[in-house]
Image: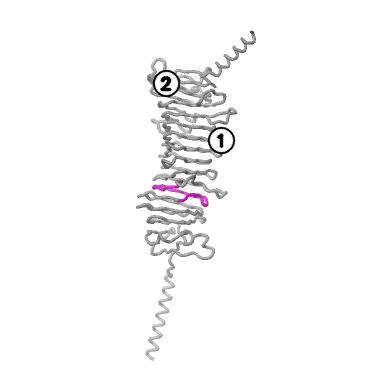
Amino acid sequence: MKKNLLFALSSLCALAASAAVEVAGGSGSPAANLNDEQYRNQDVILLPRTESPAQAAWFSGNAESTATGTTLKSMTVKPSEEGPSEWVLSRNITLDANGSESDYILDMGTKKTTYWLPTFGWFTIDNTGASTSPVKVRFGDFLFQNGSDSYFNFYTDAEVSGTSLSLGLGNGHEGKLTMRIGNSELGKNANVVFNVGTTSFQKEASLNIQRGSSLTIAQGAKFTFTGSSTFDVFGTLKYENTSAFLEIASNMTIANTGNVVLSNALSIAKGGTVTIDARSDGSAAISMATGNGRVILNGGRLKIASKNALALDIIGLYAGSSSTLELSARNEINNVYFNPNTKLALVLTGADASALFKSLGGTVDLTIEGFANEKVFFGDNGWWDSAKITATDGSKTYTKEQLELVATTGEMTAQGKYVLSLIAVPEPSTYAAIFGAIAIAFALKRRCSGK
């Protein structure tokens, strides 16, 4: 009997220890303190305010130190019929699913959530336990308002859903915020699948996929980058949304360890630049998972410093746009299609820069900067007659009448069937010699006739 009683008591204690703890929101002055001992390292359920449940419910991590955060196992919400109007979070919080009994490590329901991150602050999703299953995250409408140099971290595999996630836009609190997938310095690799309706990076917000980690943007998920936002790929990006383009209107860098796999278009808009760093292994930086994987230049710039960096069927030029393709290494490009009223500037920088366009479609309007003979090759010449083309070598500009497509011969055929070259024009000294020879011949003829 005594043993049974002790067993029952120990079981109750275990259940009590693992049960989720509820905490009612504060008014903001003060916010409910999630760093309280009864909440730390627990599954926590957020509730509306007790006295004013319809108003915003505020919750804070460790408010006494910006260097020490608050760790919870999970954080979910339980709204009432009255509210709250908004969930508000602040300070540094880490959610570590180790030992959690919750289905979701983070579930903010369907209401708006605002997260106020301090300067050098963080909000981290992690799992230090033995489980290798992805943790589940669900946002409603989630907005970060942050100080400078703060981070939203995924340090474990995760499946993320929700309506919207906004980073970098918030009422005077718009310092640099980075959403970081993995952390190679800490040995934290993460494979994250994102299925949030709209994720927007604005102002100075950034997305960073660390080496050894991956981000999959799933069907139905849309990412946008505007303003001074940045997107750095050191790991792997898989873009699987076949219903919407991945639009870049800011700066994206694919590092020498990064890979982008497309099931739809990567669209580089006006003001946007995608840079592909040089890599030594000869692998393509951008490839396609399906036939729709491609790059669209819509007024933006694609800078390539790596040899044959694109494993794509086509680069499309969006109608009415003027775009730039900058090469500092040899690249073979399968097809470039010129939609109506489009222009492309090909910029060649450095001794190793050259291009082979295997096919050109539409009405070609091409300007070449950094031009030299034996630098620009083509797989066919059917586009030439209707094309507009100019070239500059830095000191002179050449019109189409001064250029010609020449069929390659010998070893040069490996570079392409045709090469763009200057039409040979005799130097002024050559003309002088020719005219001089003619004058002498005429004088001799006259002399002979006189005799």
Front-most of 393 and 61?
61
Task: Name the kind of residue labelled 1 in the image.
Answer: Asn
| Sequence-first disc among 1 and 2 | 2
The residue labelled by disc 2 is 79
Identify the secondary structure beneath mark 1: loop
Q: CA distance from mark 1 to mark 2?
A: 34 Å
Residue 127 in percent (x, y) is at: 56, 28
Q: Is residue 70 visible?
A: no
Crowding near pointer 2: few (<14 within 10 Å), some, many (20+)? many
Q: Is 411 above or below relative to 63?
A: below
Dot 2: element = loop
Is the residue 327 above or below the residue 261 in the image?
below
Q: What percent of the width, then of the height, locates residue 234? A: 53, 41
Image x and y of residue 158, in percent: 51, 32
Q: Which residues are magenta?
A: 294-313
Residue pointed to by mark 1: 189
**316 lies above or below 397:** above
